[in-house]
Image (spheres, rainbow, N blue to C red):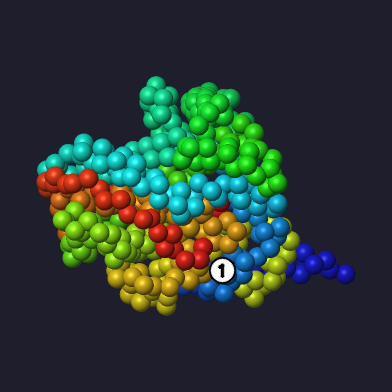
């Protein structure tokens, strides 16, 4: 008699060797996945070296099933296990089941609407300081500038670093740790390699970052004014003390792992989304002009809130994340066989909602290849067809923060500089780890600067992305 596992089946897919499929994914990710969708249908199987067997799903009904599935069966933490060497074993990204549920609940407070709104003035100040140093009259890649801004935002709003020496040290070490290449990634996926000479620099950077993060944790625990602080670290410590019924207070190691997770998950992703927004805007003069008007509306004598203006900047960001998704995909490893996409899929495979295919589909977004923020104004977005922040119980914890941060930074850029438009072809997408970055760094040219009044404080709305990178 055959077992249930023996009765399983997989959708069709290319028969290329796993190493070849891995190379195709690295070099031609979106095009390769789209080609497989055209050839094999809405569900197809890929076998990718170092990742195993992946079943891609592009039917919204199947994606909904995955996101609504029992988290004891659909494991997202296990799918992220290659990050343990950097994030740590207790990171909310790599744990599953009840432990993930309890840890996620403790981490909600810093990313609630009101908490995020309180950070908006500091985000604007950080962006303005960086923009003041941009060159005028020369073309430069803006992606490194966006990375500087988003790193500073995390260091000061999430970690709450204020000691000048420690803040400078964190600014120096974190880019070395967060901008590793494929070679260094091998050691992150296999921490035992960090003791060997080729990877000791990664280990040293991680150890230095740990030293600094533990120092911040010690300072925050000893702060008599902890309850008045607004940084995420302080709020995490306070949550454990005030709500013991929700679980014990996090240990220093657990706090370190969550801080590192927030650094990794919220740094390059938001910076890359902003880079793509500028890359798209500078190639669409009419859209750029409207975005500039929206950004500068509050600079007029009438300083009343302009909700509609914020809505347009939000629309630019949402459309950017649709047409240029930052995260490649979000996966779940099956812990037991499930009925999905017309197949009984075996335990051990990774099911992957095909974000890059679905969000580029004319079926769900007419003229999907066109950059059109208008389509996002007043739109009700389905969590099964718009998923830049993942979905289900693993929807990105920082989605609200990312959207508000992106809007505030974009507004400050458009308020303070005049950007030239360009007729050059759009920049290609290059896969950097699991993030799609502009292959030339999103090159822009500042024509001139503007003198602007102080930013007008505005109520930060809840995350405008209804429904669901990523695993959190």
Q: Position of residue 392 (x, y in %)?
A: 58, 62
Q: Position of residue 44 (x, y in %)?
A: 56, 68
Q: Residue furthest right?
A: 1
Which of the 4 image quarters holds residue 18? bottom right
Closer to the camera in the image, 48 or 278: 278
Identity of the residue drawn at 50% across and 32% down: 225
Taking the image as shown, residue 173 lies to the left or right of residue 53, namely: left
| Label 1: few (<14), some (14–19) or many (≥20) C-alpha neighbours in 10 Å | many
* Residue drawn at x 61%, y 54% as measured from the top left: 76
Disc 1 target residue:
63
Q: Quadrant of the N terminus?
A: bottom right
Q: Give the x, y percent position of residue 157.
A: 42, 40
278 relative position to 219: left or right: left
Residue 344 in picture, x, y percent from top left: 70, 70
Q: Residue at x 84, y 68 (%)?
A: 2
In this view, the residue in front, 89 or 46, is 89
């Amino acid at each position: 008699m055959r077992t249930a596992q023996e009765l399983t089946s997989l959708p069709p897919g290319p028969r290329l060797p796993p190493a070849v499929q891995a190379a195709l994914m690295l070099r031609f990710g979106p095009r390769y996945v789209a080609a497989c969708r055209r050839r094999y249908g809405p569900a197809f199987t890929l076998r990718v070296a170092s990742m195993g067997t992946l079943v891609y799903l592009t039917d919204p009904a199947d994606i909904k099933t995955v996101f609504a599935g029992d988290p004891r069966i659909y494991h997202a933490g296990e799918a992220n296990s290659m990050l343990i060497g950097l994030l740590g074993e207790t990171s909310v990204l790599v744990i599953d089941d009840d432990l993930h549920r309890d840890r996620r609940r403790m981490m909600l407070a810093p990313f609630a609407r009101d908490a995020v709104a309180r950070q908006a003035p500091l985000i604007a100040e950080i962006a303005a300081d960086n923009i003041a140093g941009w060159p005028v009259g020369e073309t430069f890649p803006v992606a490194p500038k966006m990375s500087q801004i988003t790193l500073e935002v995390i260091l000061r709003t999430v970690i709450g670093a204020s000691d000048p020496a420690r803040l400078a040290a964190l600014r120096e070490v974190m880019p070395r740790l967060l901008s590793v290449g494929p070679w260094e990634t091998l050691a992150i996926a296999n921490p035992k390699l960090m003791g060997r000479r080729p990877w000791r620099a990664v280990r040293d950077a991680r150890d230095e970052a740990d030293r600094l993060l533990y120092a911040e944790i010690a300072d925050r625990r000893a702060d008599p004014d902890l309850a008045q602080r607004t940084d995420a670290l302080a709020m995490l410590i306070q949550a454990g003390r005030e709500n013991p019924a929700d679980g014990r207070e996090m240990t220093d190691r657990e706090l370190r792992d969550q801080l590192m997770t927030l650094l990794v998950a919220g740094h390059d992703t938001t910076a890359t989304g902003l880079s793509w927004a500028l890359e798209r805007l500078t190639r669409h003069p009419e859209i750029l002009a409207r975005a500039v008007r929206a950004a500068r509306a509050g600079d007029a004598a009438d300083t009343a809130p302009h909700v509609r203006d914020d809505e347009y900047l939000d629309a630019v960001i949402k459309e950017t994340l649709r047409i240029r998704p930052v995260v490649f995909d979000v996966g779940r490893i099956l812990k037991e066989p499930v009925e999905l996409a017309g197949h009984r899929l075996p335990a051990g495979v990774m099911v992957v909602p095909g974000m890059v295919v679905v969000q580029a589909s004319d079926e769900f977004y007419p003229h999907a290849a066109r950059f059109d923020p208008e389509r996002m104004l007043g739109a009700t977005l389905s969590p099964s067809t718009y998923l830049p922040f993942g979905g289900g119980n693993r929807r990105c914890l920082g989605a609200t923060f990312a959207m508000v941060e992106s809007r505030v930074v974009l507004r400050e850029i458009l308020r303070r500089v005049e950007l030239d438009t360009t007729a050059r072809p759009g920049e290609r997408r290059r896969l950097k780890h699991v993030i799609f970055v502009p292959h030339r760094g999103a090159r822009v040219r500042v024509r001139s600067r503007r003198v602007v009044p102080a930013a007008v404080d505005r109520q930060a709305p809840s995350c405008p992305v209804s429904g669901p990178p990523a695993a959190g």
